[in-house]
Amino acid sequence: MNGGRMSRATTRKRKRVFRITTAVALMLALVGIIAFAALIDQKQKSALPESDEIATEMVDSESEQPEDAETELAEMIYIEQPYTKVYADDRVAVVYEADLGDRFERLETVSGFVKVQLNERMTGWVTEESVTTDAPVLSDDEVIAAWQQVVPNASETVLNWIGKDIATVRAELGNPSAVQRDQVNEYHFYDGFFLMVRDQKVRAVDWDKQAIATPDIQPTSEQPAGVWFEGEAVQLKLFPYSGVMRVRLEQK
């Protein structure tokens, strides 16, 4: 009898423990589910976009930006004196002599010197007092008419050479009788004229030992050592010496 009662008491006790344990486990499980759901929700609210979305947004954002407002056309200067010395970086050694009206890009100005781009590979320095940005412009028709006055025997075919690559012009003219070079240009000599070549382009045609003549238009600059006519796309320069003159028709 006593053994039966102990057995039933033990069973009831075990059932109570089981019910309590089950209830606690269910409560813990419920709390865990709620906490996990809250964590997932928080991550969804704070998570960054995927990396490819970031890249797309950045590209789109950059593509909508206006172009750099500071990007400007290069400032061009003109040589104001014939036979102007162009110096190396030490501003002592002379590397070139520029002609009246020669046109270069100004890179910077330092202590009374202007750094200019002479050709694709070379820069130099000229004194600030030897350059100008003021060059009154004539029409190209006026400049070409003035050239025809001072070199009446020249063919208008010359106008087709200026600005072309030297290989194309040499294919038409044949090989020159001589080629000379300085630090900035090449000079290809033909019968009665020579081509000034810079960066593989014919930049000018020169006729030496021409009779002194004065065109019927107002020059941009007139000095004893040189006369300069500035056109829209071409220049005419006259350099008198010893009773004759050298004439240059040049592309700007």
Image (spheres, helix red, strand yellow):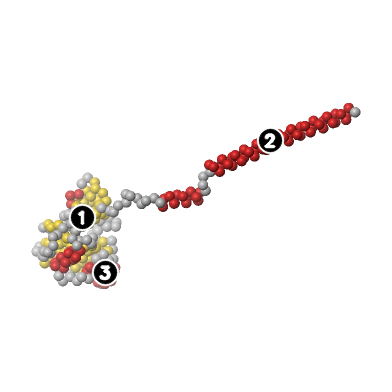
Q: Earlier in the sequence, mark 2 or mark 1?
A: 2
Residue 200, image quadrant: bottom left
* Helix, strand or loop under label 1: strand
Residue for badge 3? 169
How busy is the neighbourhood of tag 2: few (under 14 within 10 Å), some, or many (20 plus)? few
Q: Is residue 32 above or below residue 86?
A: above
* Helix, strand or loop under label 3: helix
Cα–Cα span, label 3 and label 1:
27 Å
Mark 2 or mark 3, whichever is nearer to me: 2
Residue for badge 2? 27
236 left or right of 16?
A: left
Residue 15, image quadrant: top right
Check whether the beta carbons of the residues at disc 2 and disc 3 lie within 8 A of each other.
no
| Amino acid at circle 1 | Tyr
**Residue at 68% of width from left, 35% of height from top?**
27
Residue for badge 1? 78
**Residue at 20% of width from left, 70% of height from top?**
156
**Residue at 24% of width from left, 66% of height from top?**
162
- Count of numbered circles on the image: 3
